[in-house]
Image: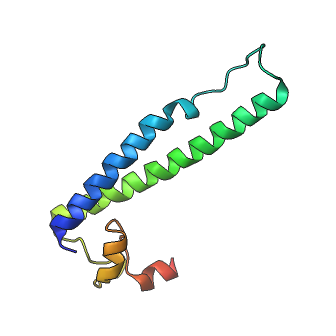
Amino acid sequence: MTQDEARNALARRAAQLEQERAISREARAPVTLQQDSVGRLSRMDAMQQQAMAQAQDRRRQQESARIEAAMRRIDLGEWGYCVTCGDDIAAARLTHDPSTPTCIKCAAKG
């Protein structure tokens, strides 16, 4: 995977994450008490769904941060090298996830 291919893949994924965040915005909103709802179990279910949506949003934010960091590494000419040890990151690993910052050895250690 070339740097241009990686940049394009990262940009596409970043756009997809932003779209997913926009779609799930309502699910992350605070749960309001509705007197006309079925009852306590419905509210608990809504709160559980909200918590799951918030957790998923945190994962999206973490992935977005990894993508931004990978884009900076591309700009600096450091993409494809492990941020921990400096060795090359395997091409297959980068093809699978262009935002990966470490080689497989360092990923296994950490």
Task: Using the image as rendered, state which of residue 81 and residue 95 is in the foreground.
Answer: 95
Name which quarter of the figure residue 53 lies in. top right
Q: Is residue 22 above or below residue 79?
A: above
Task: Using the image as rendered, state which of residue 90 and residue 96 is in the foreground.
Answer: 96
**Identity of the residue drawn at 70% across and 34% down:** 47
**Identity of the residue drawn at 31% across and 74% down:** 95
Q: Is residue 89 above or below residue 69?
A: below
**Identity of the residue drawn at 18% across and 69% down:** 3
| Colour pattern | rainbow
Residue 78 pos. (x, y %): 21, 71
**Identity of the residue drawn at 38% across and 52% down:** 64
User: Which quadrant is the N terminus positioned in?
Assistant: bottom left
Question: Residue 17: in sight, yes or no?
Answer: yes
Residue 72 pos. (x, y %): 23, 59
Question: Residue 89: in sight, yes or no?
Answer: no
Task: Using the image as rendered, state which of residue 108 and residue 2 is in the foreground.
Answer: 2
Q: How many marks?
A: 0
Left or right: 36 as drawn, with respect to 54: right
Left or right: 72 as drawn, with respect to 84: left
Residue 73 pos. (x, y %): 24, 65
The residue at the far right in this view is 40
